[in-house]
Image (cartoon, helix red, strand yellow):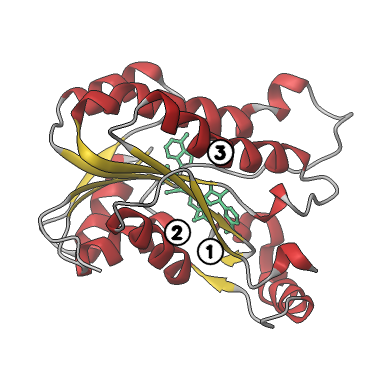
Amino acid sequence: MNLKEKNIIVIGGSSGIGKAVAQLAFDLGASVTLTSRNLDRAEKVAREIDSSITGCQLDIDNENQVQDFFHLLSEIDHVYIAAGATKLGPITESTLEDNMLAFNTRILGSLRVVRAVYSKMNDLGSVIFTGGVSTDRPISGAWVSGLATSTAEQLARVLVMEFPNIRFNAVAPGYTDTPMWDSIMGENRLNILSNIAETLPVKKIATAEEVASAVTFLMSNKSITGEVIHIDGGGRLV
Ligand SMILES: NC(=O)c1ccc[n+]([C@@H]2O[C@H](COP(=O)([O-])OP(=O)(O)OC[C@H]3O[C@@H](n4cnc5c(N)ncnc54)[C@H](OP(=O)(O)O)[C@@H]3O)[C@@H](O)[C@H]2O)c1
């Protein structure tokens, strides 16, 4: 894989899978910009990878921020959207509006990015969304995630027909060991993840680097569009 001199934007590149994508894209020769909702965090992570990486503030829940961010950019080759969070809880609790915040970030946020970036993209560049294993294996209490992952994966198909000069794809990670699980699983994270690993055909949890290698593969292969790659250790089959 070679991403030499490609301009790559990682939305939600301050942590986990997005951070691993920024690192791998840089290792493969790309010019990388990564974002976080917090400027200090974006700049810190960018510096950790290399002084040539740009770290920027961006909240994709905010239409004006998305427009302003892309207004300053041009000649973009690839965009990876990691930005997202998981909301857990019964469907009957909290308000629907609160429950749907996580869905809105992933789906409306992704659409905001597409609307702001499409005219700035080089031919056969790509936008890659993040789905997940809960599309095929819904988990009790994680219904918002299941709706968000399946819609993110479907975005990769419907948008192909809207912008034929741009490729759209998605990655669908299974349980992946990232900081996202710290707040959800707390200090039991390692135990819970290792129990989940035992249920998988490959007997291991995915790493952020493994998901990142699927993202950079989708960026570099110009004949792949409308595709979803599962990085779930066979989790959707058991
Ligand atoms: N880890 C898993 O097991 C797993 C499995 C399937 C799917 N996924 C999905 O994969 C994606 C990445 O997950 P991860 O595990 O790498 O999570 P993570 O470590 O928590 O990283 C999430 C990233 O999204 C950014 N972000 C969150 N909300 C944002 C917003 N409104 N605007 C812009 N950036 C925002 C965060 O940036 P700041 O907080 O710095 O702003 C951070 O960089 C998520 O969509 C997640 O749901 C994860």
Instruction: Sort mark 1 into few (<14), some (14-19) or many (20+) by Cα contacts within 10 Å.
Output: few
- Label 1 residue near ligand 1, CB within 8 Å: yes
The answer to whether 234 appears left or right of 206 in the picture is right
Q: Nearer the viewer, residue 56 or 138?
A: 138
Q: Is residue 105 above or below residue 149?
A: above
Q: Is residue 218 above or below residue 161?
A: below
Instruction: Sort mark 3 into few (<14), some (14-19) or many (20+) by Cα contacts within 10 Å.
Output: many
Secondary structure of residue under mark 1: loop
- Label 3 residue near ligand 1, CB within 8 Å: yes
Residue 47, image x and y in percent? 20, 59
Q: Nearer the viewer, residue 61 or 106?
A: 106
The answer to whether 107 appears left or right of 11 in the picture is right
Please state which amino acid type lies under the numbered disc 1: Thr
Quadrant of the rendering where the N terminus is positioned: bottom left
Q: Are marks 1 and 2 in contact (CB under 8 Å)?
A: yes
Q: Residue at x 70, y 36 (%)?
A: 147
Q: Which residue is mark 3?
A: 152
Q: Residue at x 20, y 66 (%)?
A: 2
The answer to whether 152 appears left or right of 53 in the picture is right
Residue 3, image x and y in percent? 19, 60
Q: CA distance from mark 1 to mark 2?
A: 7 Å
Numbered badge on residue 17 = 2
Foreground label between 3 and 1 = 3
Q: Are marks 3 and 1 in contact (CB under 8 Å)?
A: no
Please state which amino acid type lies under the numbered disc 2: Ile
Whether residue 153 is visible to the viewer of this picture, yes or no, is: yes
Numbered badge on residue 178 = 1
